[in-house]
């Protein structure tokens, strides 16, 4: 195992310290490194809180700041944060308008966020993201997994929270965006969890995992490596089958790298996905491309499509200033 680490047990703490120092103008670290919070909290604004296992950076801490999250709770690598982290974050950033939790559909995340919500004595609601169309059930969850579509939900809902929408409106909006969003990924290599010291799974030189999860969970099937165009046809085709958009529908296209894929290949996948969408009469009006919801150093990518109306697009375009996303300011 070759990684830039000192000691396996210190990876998360030292990474969080570096992140907080590098982005001290945007975020600060909660006591005991339980959470990362936004600087300059606004009184009367609904607090948006998310979190999950580390190893998916910049999700979630990289999306803390103006126009997105108010706090993010980092668990150990591929491990859910604990209820006390979520409760501490909520109590630190709630300023009188309630708390909206945005939670990926994984059993540990759901259980721990629910425990925190039960202990929270302030108005709150939860949006569950389940955008992965690859499989219905896995080792980690019952139902579809929450993957890169989480970013779409956090950005659009974050913009609405920034303009002052109330908790009920934000909760409905989050559920609407989630239902309009679908994702699917492919892995060309495994990732290596530092504590494990070896690959999470094995792939032959001529194999790929179609429909892989962001923790390296199995997908739909293991197949022989094929062309980017053929990969895009399968991933985007599965998404279109799920969303069933009408011809002329405007969409946001996110091509997300899993951590080990160069931009050269990600933009090639943008081109490939656009061809599939164009053939279906779908109009891509916004793009985001890069490693935003990663799986450590896994090679591969996911494609996410969100069917967006003009109101959602306006919220997507709204100013954002976080470590990982910045525009319009």
Image (tube, helix red, strand yellow):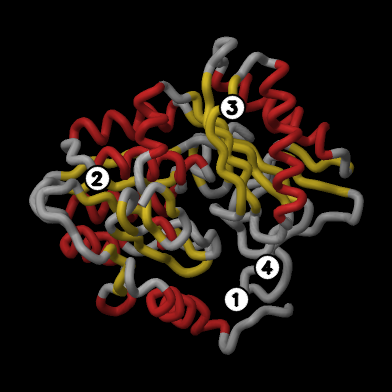
Instruction: Give the percent coordinates (x, y) of residue 249.
Output: 53, 16
Q: Which mark is residue 192?
A: 4
Question: What is the number of the mark on residue 105?
Answer: none
- Dividing the picture into quadrants, the one containing residue 260 is bottom right
Task: Give the foreground label among 2 and 1.
Answer: 2
Q: What residue is shown at x 43% (from left), y 76% (from top)?
A: 22
Residue positioned 49% across, 30% down in the render? 181
Which residue was labeled with disc 2? 162
Residue denoted by label 3: 284
In this view, the residue farthest toward the front is: 329
- Which mark is on residue 195? 1
In three-dimensional space, the C-alpha distance between marks 2 and 4, rounded to whole angstroms, equals 37 Å
Callouts 2 and 1 close, C-beta under 8 Å: no
- Front residue (pair 20, 320): 320
- Name which of mark 3 and mark 4 comes first in the sequence: 4
Q: Residue, x 36% and y 52% (percent of image)? A: 329
- The residue tagged with tag 2: helix, strand or loop? helix
Say which of 200 and 37 sits in front.
37
The disc, 2 or 3, on the residue closer to the chain's N-terminal end is: 2
| Viewer-nearest of discs 4 and 1 | 4
């Amino acid at each position: 195992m070759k990684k830039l680490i000192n000691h396996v047990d210190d990876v998360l703490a030292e990474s969080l310290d570096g992140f907080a120092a590098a982005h001290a103008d945007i975020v600060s670290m909660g006591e005991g490194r339980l959470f990362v919070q936004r600087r300059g909290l606004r009184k009367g604004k609904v607090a948006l809180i998310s979190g999950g296992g580390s190893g998916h950076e910049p999700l979630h801490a990289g999306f803390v700041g103006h126009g997105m999250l108010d706090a993010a709770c980092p668990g150990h690598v591929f491990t859910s944060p604990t209820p006390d982290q979520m409760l501490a974050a909520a109590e630190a950033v709630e300023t009188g308008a309630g708390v909206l939790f945005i939670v990926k559909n994984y059993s540990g995340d759901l259980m721990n966020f629910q425990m925190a919500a039960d202990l929270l004595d302030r108005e709150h609601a939860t949006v569950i993201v389940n955008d992965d169309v690859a499989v219905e059930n896995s080792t980690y969850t019952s139902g579809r997994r929450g993957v890169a579509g989480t970013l779409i939900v956090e950005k659009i809902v974050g913009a609405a929270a920034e303009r002052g929408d109330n908790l009920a409106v934000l909760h409905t909006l989050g559920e609407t965006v989630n239902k309009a969003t679908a994702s699917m990924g492919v892995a060309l290599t495994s990732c290596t969890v530092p504590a494990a010291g070896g690959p999470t799974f094995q792939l032959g030189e001529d194999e790929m995992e179609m429909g892989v999860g962001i923790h390296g969970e199995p997908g739909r099937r293991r197949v022989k490596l094929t062309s980017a165009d053929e990969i895009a046809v399968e991933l985007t085709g599965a998404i279109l089958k799920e969303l069933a958009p009408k011809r002329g529908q405007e969409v946001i296209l996110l091509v997300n790298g899993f951590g080990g894929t160069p931009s050269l290949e990600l933009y090639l996948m943008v081109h490939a996905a656009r061809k599939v969408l164009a053939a279906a009469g779908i109009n891509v009006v916004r793009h985001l491309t890069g490693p935003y919801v990663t799986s450590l150093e896994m090679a591969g990518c996911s494609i996410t499509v969100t069917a967006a109306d003009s109101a959602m697009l306006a919220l997507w375009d709204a100013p954002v200033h976080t470590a990982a996303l910045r525009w319009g300011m």
